[in-house]
Image (spheres, rainbow, N blue to C red):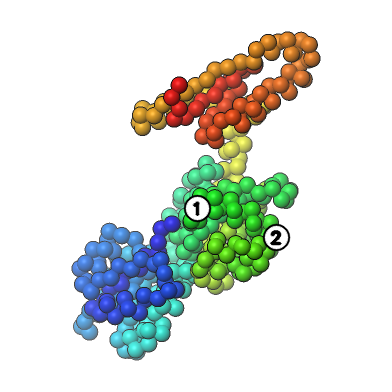
C-alpha cells in the first residue's frame, strides 16, 4: 500500500521532525526541508497528503506565503505554524487557504494529533471542493465498466480519500443467501488476507445498518472471531459501506482505518458524490458482465463459447509476442458421443457435455481458458505452457 506522505518545510525543520517521530505516526513518510527552494521543488514533483510549513522570515506576508505553497499543491491540506498568536497573521493564513493553524509555543502538544486527524480520519475532505475536483476524483470509477478493475479502483480511491490501510470489496449472494464473493482486497500482508477477512467477518459486516457509511470497532470483530488480531494491527476502526445494486444484489466495502472519521467527514460533498458514482458504476459493471455472458458464455455448459475463443487467442498472441511467452491450445472431442445420444436421448447427452466441461474446468488453472467450441468439441487454452 502507498504510504501517507507529509512534507515539512520550515527553517527549523529538525525541531518539527523530532516532534513527529512517534509510534502513532508509524509508516508515514516524511520529507523534511529547511530550504524553501528544495521544498518547493519537491512539491512540484511529488504528491503529499499533508504539508506542514512555517514562514522563513517575519517579513514574508502570511497570506502570500500560504498562497504560494498551495499554488504548487492546490489539493493538499496545509498546516501552518505561526510563531505567536497574532490575530492578523491568523486571518491572512485563513484567507490564503490554510487548513489548520498551530502555534510554536504549543506545537509539541498539538502537531501530532493534528496530523493524525488529517492522515487517518479524512479531515482534509472538509475543505471546499469545486465540481471539477469532485469529477476528477471520481473519473477512474465513472469510466470503468470492468468489474475487476472497478473493484480495485474503488478501494484505491477510498485509500486516497480516507487513508485506509487495508480494505475489502465483496458481494453478498442473491437475496442475502449468505454466500460472499470477494471482488477485491488491498493492504493485507499476505495474498490470502482478503479471503481470510471475508471468511471470518463477512456475515458480521453484512448485518450492518444500511447504505450510509457506518463505523465498526475492531474489538467487535475480534470478539466474534478470536485469533484475528493480526488482521487489524493498529487499524482499530473499520468503515463499512453497503451498496444496494438491485433488490437481490448487494456489494459491501470495508476499510481499515487508524483514526475515526467524524460524521461531518462522512457527509462531505466528495464522499457523498463518490458514493453515488460507485453505486452507479457497480450497476453498470454488473450489466456489462451480464451482456458479456450473453455474448461469450455457452448456455448449456456455462463455459466460454467459440466466439470468445477468437478474443482470447488474439489476446494471447499479442501477449506472447510482447513477453516471449509460450501458450498451448488443445482441441478435443468426446469419442462416440453420438452413441450416447442415440442410446440414452439428448437430455442425457446434454448432461454428459456439462459433466465433461466441469471436469475440464477443474483440471486447469484459473488463468487458463476452457471453451465449448460446438457440439461435443472443446478447446483448452493453457497460458505460459509449452506444448
| Label 1: few (<14), some (14–19) or many (≥20) C-alpha neighbours in 10 Å | few
Left or right of 27 in this view: 42: left
Task: Report x, y in % for residue 347.
Answer: 77, 20
User: Where 150 sits versus 211, above or below?
Assistant: above
Q: Considering the image in quadrants, where does the C terminus appear?
A: top left
Residue at coordinates 33% horizontally, 86% vertically from top-left?
104
| Disc 1/disc 2 C-alpha distance (Å) | 27 Å
Left or right of 38 in this view: 233: right
Task: Report x, y in % for residue 293.
Answer: 61, 32
* Rendering quarter of residue 380: top right
Element under disc 2: loop
Q: Of residues 380 and 174, which is closer to you in this image?
A: 380
Q: Of residues 299 and 68, which is closer to you in this image?
A: 299
Question: Can residue 117 be seen in this snapshot?
Answer: yes
Element under disc 1: loop
Residue at coordinates 32% horizontally, 78% vertically from top-left?
18
Left or right of 166 in this view: 302: right
| Name of the residue lying farthest toward the right | 344
| Label 2: few (<14), some (14–19) or many (≥20) C-alpha neighbours in 10 Å | few
Residue at coordinates 33% horizontally, 74% vertically from top-left?
52
Kindly report which numbered mark, 1 or 2, lies closer to the viewer in this rendering: 1
Task: Report x, y in % for residue 58.
Answer: 22, 84
Say which mark, if any, is on residue 207: 2
- Nearer-N-terminus badge (1/2): 1
User: Where 183 sits versus 110, above or below?
Assistant: above
Q: Of residues 198 and 9, which is closer to you in this image?
A: 198
Dots 1, 2 in contact, CB < 8 A:
no
Task: Report x, y in % for residue 97.
Answer: 36, 73
Say which mark, if any, is on residue 373: none
Residue topped by disc 1: 190
Amino acid at each position: 500500500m502507498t504510504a501517507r506522505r507529509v512534507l515539512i518545510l520550515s527553517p527549523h525543520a529538525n525541531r518539527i521532525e523530532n516532534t513527529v517521530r512517534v509510534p502513532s505516526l508509524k509508516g508515514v513518510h516524511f520529507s523534511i526541508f529547511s530550504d524553501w527552494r528544495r521544498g518547493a521543488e519537491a512539491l512540484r514533483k511529488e504528491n503529499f497528503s499533508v504539508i506542514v510549513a512555517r514562514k522563513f522570515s517575519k517579513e514574508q506576508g502570511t497570506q502570500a506565503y500560504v498562497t504560494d505553497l498551495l499554488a504548487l499543491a492546490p489539493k493538499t491540506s496545509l498546516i501552518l505554524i505561526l510563531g505567536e498568536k497574532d490575530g492578523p497573521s491568523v486571518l491572512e493564513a485563513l484567507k490564503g487557504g490554510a487548513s489548520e493553524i498551530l502555534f510554536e509555543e504549543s506545537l509539541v502538544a498539538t502537531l501530532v494529533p493534528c496530523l493524525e486527524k488529517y492522515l487517518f480520519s479524512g479531515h482534509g475532505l472538509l475543505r471546499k471542493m469545486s465540481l471539477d475536483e469532485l469529477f476528477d476524483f471520481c473519473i477512474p470509477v465513472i469510466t470503468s465498466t470492468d468489474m475487476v478493475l472497478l473493484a480495485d479502483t474503488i478501494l484505491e480511491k477510498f485509500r486516497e480519500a480516507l487513508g485506509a490501510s487495508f480494505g475489502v470489496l465483496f458481494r453478498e449472494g442473491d437475496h442475502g443467501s449468505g454466500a460472499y464473493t470477494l471482488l477485491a482486497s488491498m493492504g493485507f500482508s499476505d495474498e490470502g488476507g482478503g479471503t481470510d477477512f471475508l471468511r471470518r467477518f463477512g456475515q458480521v459486516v453484512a448485518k450492518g445498518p444500511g447504505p450510509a457509511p457506518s463505523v465498526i470497532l475492531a474489538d467487535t470483530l475480534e470478539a466474534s472471531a478470536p485469533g484475528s488480531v493480526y488482521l487489524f494491527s493498529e487499524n482499530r476502526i473499520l468503515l463499512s459501506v453497503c451498496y444496494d445494486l438491485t433488490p437481490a444484489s448487494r456489494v459491501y466495502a470495508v476499510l481499515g482505518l487508524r483514526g475515526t472519521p467524524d460524521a461531518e467527514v462522512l457527509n462531505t460533498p466528495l464522499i457523498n458524490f463518490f458514493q453515488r458514482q460507485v453505486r452507479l458504476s457497480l450497476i453498470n459493471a454488473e450489466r456489462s458482465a451480464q451482456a458479456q455472458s450473453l455474448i461469450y458464455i455457452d448456455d448449456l455448459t456455462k463455459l466460454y463459447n467459440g466466439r470468445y475463443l477468437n478474443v482470447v487467442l488474439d489476446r494471447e498472441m499479442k501477449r506472447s509476442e510482447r513477453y516471449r511467452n509460450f501458450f498451448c491450445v488443445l482441441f478435443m472431442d468426446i469419442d462416440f458421443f453420438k452413441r450416447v445420444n442415440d442410446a440414452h436421448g439428448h437430455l442425457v447427452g446434454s448432461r454428459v457435455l456439462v459433466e465433461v466441461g466441469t471436469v475440464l474446468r477443474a483440471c486447469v488453472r484459473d488463468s487458463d481458458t476452457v471453451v465449448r467450441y460446438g457440439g461435443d468439441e472443446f478447446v483448452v487454452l493453457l497460458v505460459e505452457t509449452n506444448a
